Amino acid sequence: MVKQAAENTPTPTHKPSDVEVSHNASTKRLRFLDREGRGFFSYKDSLGLLCVGTLGLHLIILVVSFLQYGALSRLANQPPPTLVQTESGQAFPVAVMANDERTPEVIQAFVLDTLTLLFSWSGSLTEENEPDRGVVVSGSQRVTSTAAIASYAMSSDFRAEMLNQLAEMTPAGVFSGRTQVFFEPLNIEEPIAIAQGQWKVTVIGNLIVTQDRRRLEDRIPFNKEIFLQAVTPPRVWESSSLLEREVASVRAAGLEITEIRDIEP
């Protein structure tokens, strides 16, 4: 009977005491304080800020790229310059062209200047006002100093052959001042393009020969076909030697002669 009564007696519900409530509140407060000790942002917060910062940086780069594109577009649409000015204040017209292109006027002027230097032999050095002793080519054969410098307007494989021909043509009296030879151009025709960056120019002229400064002159026909090609002109530095400057001057047009032929009748 007593056992049965004990089984039927309801089990009393456990109520947390004030001590337990106080303990739970203290634990929560400690967890909150521990979070504050770890920092204001959590790992997830830091990752989110990193993503936002990266997105902002990409937006800035995109804006800068658009600005650069606009600047380049305006620069590309601007007309090319038509004049260049030297330090002395002189202005020259310019034109835009490919690296291996030359105007007919430039080609004709180069041919005229080069042939004049090659085949005009006065026997004296104008700048130094002294006799021209010439430059030895082979053995006792010589060419004038001007012709030797002008020969650098030839291609490297043609220059040696041209110097030998000039040495054979140059009279010995040139170096003693008794003989003078001058190139007389009569007609320099329009250049004919034979390949990309290569041209042929027909030249009609004479070589005027005088002896002992007499007025009596001999005219030797000089009718040639000049073959030339575009090259990169050499640069001159402050430390460049006199020879380097002279070579650069004869190749300033960015051209060189590759062959000189007689005009076939």
Image (spheres, rainbow, N blue to C red):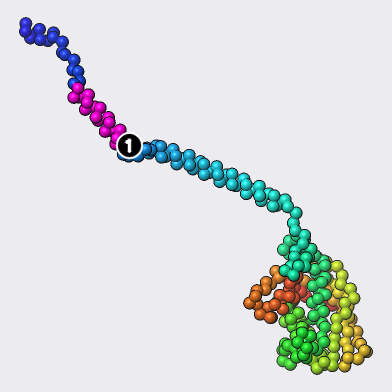
Q: Is residue 240 left or right of residue 207?
A: left
Q: Would residue 198 be visible to someone looking at this image?
A: no
- Give the quarter of the image for residue 138: bottom right
Task: Tell me the residue at 67%/73% (across/down).
Answer: 236
Q: Amino acid at mark 1?
A: Glu
In the rendered view, tell whether residue 107 sits above or below residue 33: below
| Circle 1 residue | 36
Q: Is residue 240 visible?
A: yes
> Could you say where residue 31 lies in the image, as x and y percent from the top left?
28, 33
Whether the magenta-drawn stretch holds residue 15 is answered as no
| Viewer-proximal residue among 61 and 91 | 91
Residue 259: name its quadrant.
Answer: bottom right
Q: Residue at x 62, y 49 (%)?
A: 68
> What residue do we see at 13% from left, 8% from top?
8
> Going by the picture, which residue comes out furthest to the right?
216
What residue span does the magenta drawing correspond to?
A: 18-36
Q: Residue furthest left?
A: 2
Q: Which quadrant of the structure image shows residue 62? A: top right
Query: How far across and how far down the image is residue 106, in percent?
Result: 80, 68
Q: Quadrant of the C terminus?
A: bottom right
Where is the N terminus found, in terms of image quarters? top left
Nearer the observer, 90 or 147: 90
**Residue at (15% x, 10% y) in the render:** 10
Q: State the image coordinates of residue 27 (x, y, percent, origin top left).
A: 25, 30
How many numbered circles does the render carry? 1
Q: What is the crowding at mark 1: few (fewer than 14 residues within 10 Å), some, or many (at least 20)?
A: few
Q: Position of residue 246 (x, y in %)?
A: 72, 78
